[in-house]
Image: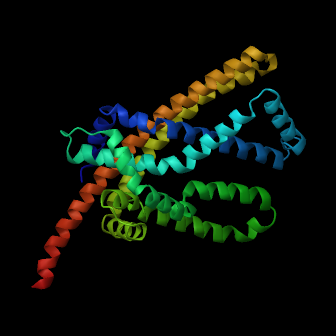
Amino acid sequence: MKYAEIIHNSWELTTGNPKLKWLVFVPSFVAVLVFVLEICWQLYVYLEEFGAIDSMINFTEIKGIFHFLSEHNLLLLAIFAVIFILFFAFIVPSWVIASLVLSVKQKIEAPEKYCSVRLKMIEAFGYFFRLFELHAVLGIFSVWSFALFMATFFRYFHDSFFQVLWPALLIYFFFTIVVTVFTSFAAYFLICENHDVTTSIKKSFGLVMLNFGRTLSIILLMFLVNFRVILNVILILLVPIGLFAAFSYFSNSFILVLAVILGVFLLAFTAYLTAILEVFSTAVWTESFLQMRKDQEALIAVAIPEKNI
């Protein structure tokens, strides 16, 4: 498998199909927003836990926020925003991923054929519930979910239970990585070959076992690409954050409005980069999956006659 060719083809597919990027843009925007909120919340509670700030937000302050929203007729808008974020953060991604994989698969197998994204979105509904179930089953083995759990567990129990349970947590982290690696192709078996959740997981384990070196190479490659993009995004975000921190001593309503506008713009820009990366990553994994399956079927076709003989 030629990795350079896969990267080249995947990048051409990404840049040559802008509809796929916009398909992923809104879920990417919500994902970036949720990611920023999670990081900010973890930072906030850690600062309170270790005495960097006086106290956390209390019930009186929360009540004051609700009173402010009600007084300015913003409560319904806030509720809608929360529902919108939850819907696009936890429900929509399964549908979007199925649509994206189906579109990329057709672009790889039949590049000359017109690919209707809307048609793929309709077709993706047939995979939605199984893909949602797959994500729910594998969610407890997510490295990011484990990192959030560890952050919360350490914050509450760093002086007690954590000192006793950290070896078990370390073992579970290693197990999480193993499961993540060996289920790398589960979603692609489910979507590309229309298997159920259990069969997709089993077949993914088998395919990774046969192509362990290839799979690790793709994971490392995509990690480096993601790390480069994340580093660039952090550098982009640090500049305005530093400027507004400096201007905080002279804060006024104009600076606050400008900060909000710039913050939304930066989130949108980050979401756009994330959408590009999502399409590119899906193209890399889909093409790798199709090539590995082709090699696996060729190997089986050779092995079966030998066995019969």
Is 179 situated above or below 28?
below
Q: Which residue is found at the position 35% from the left and 31% from the top? A: 18
Q: Is residue 213 left or right of residue 112?
A: right
Q: Where is residue 112 in the image (x, y as percent from the top left)?
A: 18, 39
Q: Is residue 45 visible?
A: yes
Q: In this view, does 126 lie to the left or right of 248?
A: left
Residue at the far left: name it: 309
Residue 233 figure quarter: top right
Q: Nearer the viewer, residue 266 or 181?
A: 266
Pinpoint residue 181: horizontal percent, then vertical percent: 44, 62
Q: Residue at 65%, 70% (x, y): give it.
A: 167
**Relative to 150, is 185 on the left or the right?**
left
Question: Residue visible at 33% across and 36% down?
Answer: 14
Residue 180 vertical placement versus 68 (above, below): below
x, y (%) of residue 230? 52, 38
Q: Which colour scheme is used?
A: rainbow
Q: Is residue 55 left or right of residue 158?
A: right
- Which picture quadrant has residue 16? top left
**Nearer-the-camera pick, 250 or 108:** 108
Q: Nearer the viewer, residue 249 or 132?
A: 132
Quadrant assignment for the N terminus: bottom left
The image shows residue 276, relative to residue 190, as above or below, that is above
Q: Residue at the location (54% across, 58% down)?
A: 142
